[in-house]
Image (cartoon, coloured by chain):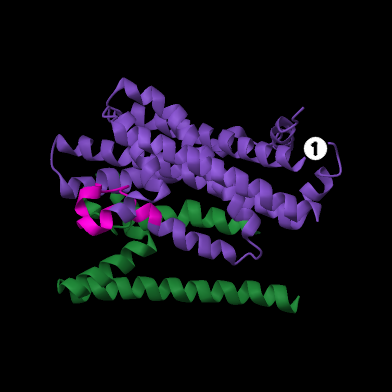
Chain colours: A purple, B green
Amino acid sequence: MSSAHLIVVRHLWVLRRGRPWGLLVEGIFEPFLYLLSIGVGVGQLVVAGPELTRYAAFVAPGLLATSAMNSAVNETTNSFWWRVRFEKLYDAIVTTPMRVSDIAAGEIAASTLRSGLSSTCFLLVITALGMVRSWWALLAVPAAVLVAFAFSAAGLAVATLMRDVHHQQYLQLCMLPMFLFATTFFPLSVYPAPLQPVVAALPLYQSIELVRGLTTGTPDSGTLAAVAYLVAMGALGWWLAHRRLGRMLLT
Amino acid sequence: MWSRVGRIYKWVVMPLYLFSGTFFAVAQLPEALRPIVYVTPLWHGVDLCRSLSLGTATWGGSLGHVAYLTAMGTAGYLLARRTYRRHLHA
């Protein structure tokens, strides 16, 4: 019997005296600021009048996917990484009946839960601001959870590869440009044709494609392709994280 | 300690970066918010650099920005000297 859920219970137990609202505000704050600054502020410079809400509604799902990504990557490459490298929590856990596969599954579940929760709150914020265009947006909740899952699994795999604190900087070196260029603020069509497949191959692009298709009410074959991409990415990350964790903890 | 650095970045640096006239004009903000932006240091830096590079700088405005930034640097230096001295010579 799998005891992966015990990892989730353990994290909830550690945070039991924390403030859940603080956690959610942390998750919403940053995308909200970007939404106001770029979505509304820059939006006023590029389009006028009623078109403005269309631009903000274009940027909002991009920020939603980004917030799911950032929170999942932070949770795994910061919090989990700290526990596995310095606190040696899992070295203690593997001496119990829990297996490495339980640890990997439980950590991915805990990170997905947290990231999915804060992105859902951001979805509520943009819905309240009138930046959601369709009932398809209800599916943006499972979509955000899928994005959170894919990046949690990939983040867990990356965390097992990081040895030093400064490796975080290399990670940021990938994450920040991806945030700026993965069509968060402008469509794929602005890129020259040879560059478009490169951008489309980015995991954040696929995540944004999925969420944007749903909140603007225009899901198409690209949306399904994005689902397949994210499922594959999550599965690959999970497998790699499991393998690496086994090597780290059992040898 | 680490989380405190992160918190300063998130709650202070990020908002400054996004709302100090970096990406859009301060004039686009609601009237009530503008005075707040005018006292933030990044706005002085942004306006100084922008007016100089666009050739719209005025002596009065630029000297005001320079004075603000110099005062801020000096205040930071004096404060840091005080706390460093306290920590290292206590």
- Which chain letter matches label 1? A
What amino acid type should be assigned to the residue bearing mark 1?
Met
Q: Which residue is mark 1?
A: A98
Q: Residue at x 68, y 36 (%)?
A: A106
- Whether residue B89 is situated above or below residue A219 in the rendered picture: below
Q: Residue at x 63, y 64 (%)?
A: A165
B74 on left or right of A127: right
Q: Residues within 10 Å of mark 1 (few under 14, many from 20)?
A: some
Residue B66 visible in rendering: yes
User: Residue A175 at x, y = what percent?
Assistant: 45, 56
User: Residue A154 at x, y = what percent?
Assistant: 55, 48
Q: Residue at x 52, y 60 (%)?
A: A171
- The image quadrant where one finds the C terminus of chain A is bottom right
The part of the image, by quadrant, that contains residue B62 is bottom left
A243 on left or right of A37: right
User: Residue A22 at x, y = what percent?
Assistant: 57, 38
Q: B62 and B18: which one is in front?
A: B18
Q: For residue A195: magenta?
A: yes
B37 on left or right of A109: left
Q: Which residues are magenta?
A: A178-196
Residue B57 visible in rendering: no
User: Tag 1's secondary structure?
Assistant: loop
